[in-house]
Amino acid sequence: MSLEGFKWTLVALMVVDHIAVAFQLPFEWRLPGRVVMPGFLALLTYHLAQGASPGKYLARLVPFALISQPGYSLILQQHPLSLWPLNILADLSASVLAAGGQRAWLGWVLGVYNLTTAMPLAVVWSLRGMRLLAGVVLALNVWMLGWPLWVGLLEGGAYLLFLHLVPRLGKGRRTPWWAFYAVYPAHLTAIYLVKRFLEG
């Protein structure tokens, strides 16, 4: 699998997870989606370790995080202007800020508004060579959110596995960078509209 294929596989699993959330499907429907956050976080960690510009990352993440928040809140059956919890693009933005040095404090503050508050810490520890601790803190965070402990261990273990796997993937045929980000608000809006239509 290429890096590009890996990214779009995560996107597909994320869509299934959000459909399961919106339509309150059984627990089993959400299990494949448990590897999405670790996968996106591993990609972020890898690119930062390779010298990717935090400023460039934020310039891409933040606008789409803002656009996506209303749809994300509606999927969670909250008011569209709700600011808690923040969507995963905001989670990743917090991790970039925390790892970027300048304005790192803002990343830690923003992380408090995320469900997976350990994401910034996991990235910082991974970049400092403390990968095992990063996996453990992610697993504990997921468990504290109410998931079974084995699901937390699955997510923490998936992050460690992906950290090992991602550098070994070929780049593959690239799609425009904005397509990867744009699918996030687009699919949230589409799921919400379909749900409203089906509910009459």
Image: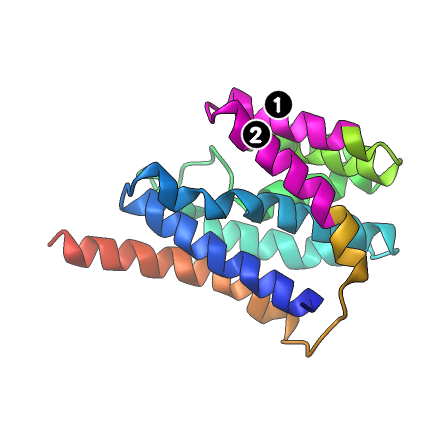
Residue segment shown in magenta: 133-162
Q: As drawn, is 23 to the left or to the right of 157?
A: left
Write the residue at 57% across / 29% down.
Answer: 152
- The Cα atoms of the two marked residues, 2 and 1, are separated by 6 Å
Task: Identify residue for label 1.
Answer: 140
Asked if residue 88 lies in the magenta stretch, the reply is: no
Q: Is residue 41 above or below residue 51?
A: above
Q: Is residue 125 above or below residue 100?
A: above
Write the residue at 48% across / 53% down.
Answer: 14
Q: Secondary structure at mark 2?
A: helix
Name which of mark 2 and mark 1 comes first in the sequence. 1
Please state the horizontal and vertical placement of residue 140, each as a whole percent of the image.
61, 23
Q: Secondary structure at mark 1?
A: helix
- Residue sitting nearer the eye, 102 or 170: 170
Please state the horizontal and vertical placement of residue 63, each as a whole percent of the image.
58, 56
Tell whether label 1 touches label 2 (CB within 8 Å): yes
Disc number placed over residue 152 in the picture, else none: 2
Please state the horizontal and vertical placement of residue 184, each as a whole percent of the image.
49, 58
Write the residue at 68% across / 26% down.
Answer: 137
Q: As drawn, is 62 to the left or to the right of 132?
A: left
